[in-house]
Image: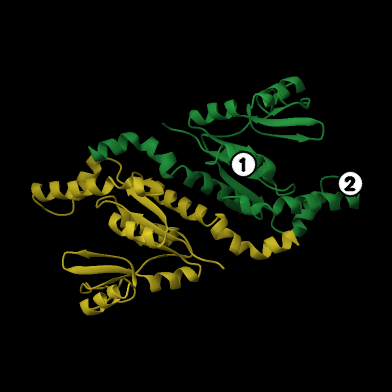
Chain colours: A green, B yellow
């Protein structure tokens, strides 16, 4: 049976992950970004089921208790999680799914779905990383130092990932991601089921 | 330390392997085809050290006795083999090497170099396969049937390979091979050593 691949993509803040993933998804067929459940309020323009599945805290806790999440995290006062059912429904149609999460989430995913293909995106230098973290607003030096330290802590987990992509030249980084998805579709596991007819014809 | 990857590429006769590999090697830097040792005579235009390392039967047997081959095969009256030393010298410079061999050779390579990335190339249909095997000359039906059966036997080993590429549209098949090599260079194992400076800078 044809089945999609789950790609888990991680990066420190300031690595440009979301722009890269959006460009990747726009450039390939049969590839989508996972839609998480969250307890936070929709921001203007955000649509339920498109940007997030917006749920109440009670519903979220209920799903959590029933082990319905592949991974989840609490960020400040809000919960975020990836529904196993949503994910499996998409993978079973043969669609590849990208999960944009942090390294803690990636560890949870690896435990429950060891066949996930994991990618870590790196900034091209500490200087660029710092510049990107600074340009987010007019924060104090202390806040920026804290943010930089958090990014460095995140980066130290790069060794846990299957692939490393450096976001130096944006279009090159997109090509790198495309090559990873493209080659994954050619693996025995992903490709043989799609070639069932051809293989039967050749071996008859 | 930067180290190249060994790609082992197999296909039945008539799948168009050599043309694909030549186009792939011409399209990418740092990628070369392995130069085998052989006891057969050079054909017009063939150069020692470029097309093959031409050696005497005594020399070949001596190398074989000393376990100097990663894989070897006897085809009719001639020996062919891949020297471990030649291969390691190239891989240690960071060059990726392609080994074009049959599935028996691939089994030998996997035993000695389990980190080899293996690719099987398939023809797009039995009809095309038969046409390609026919167009090689004016052979009898019996010879063609024998050749087709040999190809089918080869194809039955596709399950032993990491990647499957169908040579239907030639340029698409070249792109498939490029994606496999490209993504392999982004794996943790291949990429992290090349990123040593960046990682030190980011984590300092």
In the image: residue A90, left or right of residue A58: left
Residue at the spot x=68%, y=60% of the render? Answer: B199
Residue at the front extreme of this rendering: A65
Vertical side of B93 occupied by B102: above or below: above
Dot 2 alpha-carbon crowd within 10 angstroms: few under 14, some 14 to 19, many 20 or more: few
Q: Dot 1 lies on which element?
A: helix
Question: Tag 1, which chain?
Answer: A
Nearest the eye: B46 or B58:
B58
Nearest the eye: A160 or B39:
A160
Task: Look at mark 2 in the image and give the residue it sits on.
Answer: A138
Residue at the spot x=25%, y=51% of the render? Answer: B14
Using the numbered discs, state the Cα–Cα distance from disc 2 to disc 1 in whole angstroms. Answer: 28 Å
Q: Position of residue B114 (x, y in %)?
A: 42, 58
Question: Tag 2, which chain?
Answer: A
Nearest the eye: A51 or B193:
B193
Q: Position of residue A19 (x, y in %)?
A: 67, 42
Q: Position of residue A3 (x, y in %)?
A: 47, 33
Task: Look at mark 1 in the image and give the residue it sits on.
Answer: A23
Dot 1 alpha-carbon crowd within 10 angstroms: few under 14, some 14 to 19, many 20 or more: some
In the image: residue A197, left or right of residue A156: left
Residue A166 at least partly seen: no
In primary-sequence order, the first of circles 2 and 1 is 1
């Amino acid at each position: 049976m044809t089945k999609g691949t789950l790609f888990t993509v991680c990066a420190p803040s300031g690595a440009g992950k979301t722009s890269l993933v959006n460009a990747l998804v726009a450039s390939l067929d049969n590839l989508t970004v996972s839609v998480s459940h969250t307890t936070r309020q929709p921001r203007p323009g955000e649509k339920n089921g498109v940007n997030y599945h917006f749920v109440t805290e009670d519903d979220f806790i209920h799903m959590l208790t029933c082990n319905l999440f592949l991974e989840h995290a609490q960020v400040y006062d809000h919960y975020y999680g990836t529904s196993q059912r949503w994910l499996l429904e998409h993978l079973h149609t043969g669609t590849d799914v990208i999960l944009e999460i942090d390294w803690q989430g990636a560890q949870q995913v690896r435990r429950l779905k060891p066949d996930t293909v994991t990618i870590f995106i790196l900034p091209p230098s500490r200087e660029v990383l710092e510049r990107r973290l600074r340009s987010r607003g007019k924060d104090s030096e202390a806040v920026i130092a804290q943010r930089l330290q958090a990014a460095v802590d995140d980066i130290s987990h790069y060794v846990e990932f299957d692939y490393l992509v450096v976001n130096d030249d944006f279009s090159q980084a997109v090509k790198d991601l495309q090559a990873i998805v493209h080659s994954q579709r050619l693996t025995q596991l992903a490709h043989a089921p799609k070639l069932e007819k051809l293989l039967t014809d050749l071996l008859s």
